[in-house]
Image: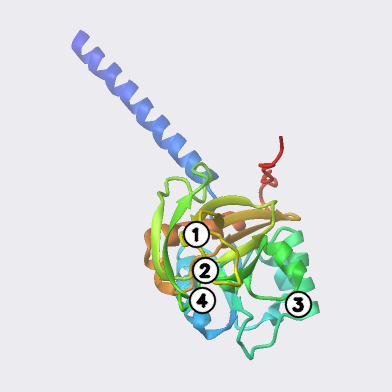
Amino acid sequence: MFLNYTIQKTLLIFSFFLFSTIYVFSQNQANYPSLNGKKVIFVYGGMQGHSPKESADLFVPLLEKEGATVKVFNNFSVYEDEKLMGEADLIIQTFTDAFTADPRMNGAQFNGLKNAILNGTGFAGWHGGLADSSPNPQYHFIVGGDFISHPGELEGMKTSEYEVKIYDQEDYITKGIKDFKVSDTEQYYMMIDPNVKVLATSEFKLNNWSPAENNIKGSFMPVIWKKNYGKGRVFFNSLGHFLREFEIPEVLTVQMRGFRWASEGKYHPKENLILPVYKK
């Protein structure tokens, strides 16, 4: 009798513990950003060297697999559709302006993009598809940075191998991600808005890239960041010159998490992302 009671009590405690663990886990999962049910606009175009159409072919199925509804456009005209832009939760853009015959983003299209983000639509992308999409300085203020060069190209060294160092280990986008290496790709040198939250960096290893450039050896450049723009969330990753870089699990994981996070601007309070690192 006593043994049966002890067994029953043990089973009851175990069941309660198991239920609590599952409940807490499910609650934590529910609090994570999600693309399920989100409306996504995917815009591609521009320089063919960055594989814009292939980028859509790669990511649209992944977005739809997570439950997103995706509308794909091969130019900026959708940015003038106020209704569609207002309904969108996330805009993903892979359109490199350089060396292309495609029409640039005009003033009306920029204003449509800007207003949508100000009102909570997320904006996300990678490499030149986001950082080199427009010569408009106001556009770069939205993104949080401006592509300057990939140092070394004047010495015939367009591509390089470097380590991506995770700077913020606690943020949802980079949590659990270890430092990793990328090779045979471009290492971006950029001008950065001080009001971005830096998630990952890379170090420039060489002494002088060319006579025309500063000695940048030992300097660290932000590689991945997020920021606010009005009510909208903006996510940028400077990796991805070649689509094969998304075969690196860490790169794809961070990119998809960035999409999820940026899609939540309309549904959660704005995060305080300003870090006054130079404040005494």
Q: Nearer the viewer, mark 3 or mark 4?
A: 4
Whichever of labels 1 and 2 marks the residue nearer the N terminus, that label is 1
Q: Which residue is mark 1?
A: 204
Q: Is residue 31 above or below residue 132?
A: above
Tell me which numbered mark, 1 or 3, is placed earlier along the sequence. Answer: 3
CA–CA distance between discs 1 and 3?
36 Å
Mark 2–mark 3 distance (CA, rounded to whole Å): 37 Å
Give x and y (percent) for residue 120. Answer: 71, 58
Q: Please tell me which residue is depicted at 73% across the width and 54% down the height of the picture.
A: 231
Which type of secondary structure does the marked residue at label 4 adopt? helix
Q: CA distance from mark 1 to mark 4?
A: 14 Å
Mark 4, residue position: 153
Q: Residue at x 57, y 84 (%)?
A: 47
| Label 4 neighbour load within 10 Å: few <14, some 14-19, many 20+ | few
Query: In this rendering, does residue 1 appear at all?
Result: no
The residue at the point 69 percent across, 78 percent down is: 78
Q: Nearer the viewer, residue 121 or 279?
A: 279
Q: Which residue is mark 2?
A: 209
Label 3 secondary element? helix
Q: Are marks 2 and 3 in contact (CB under 8 Å)?
A: no
Tag 1: residue type? Phe
Residue 225 percent location from the top left of the image: 59, 55
Q: Residue at x 45, y 65 (%)?
A: 65
Instruction: Determine crowd level at label 1: few under 14, some 14-19, many 20+ residues with C-alpha closer than 10 A.
Output: many
Q: Viewer-nearest of labels 1 and 3?
A: 1
Tell me the residue that label 3 is attached to: 109
> Sequence-wise, which precedes: disc 1 or disc 4?
4
Regarding mark 1 in the picture, which secondary structure is present there? loop
CB under 8 Å between discs 1 and 3 = no
- Horizontally, is 246 left or right of 119 in the view? left
Q: Give the mark toward the camera: 2 or 4.
A: 2
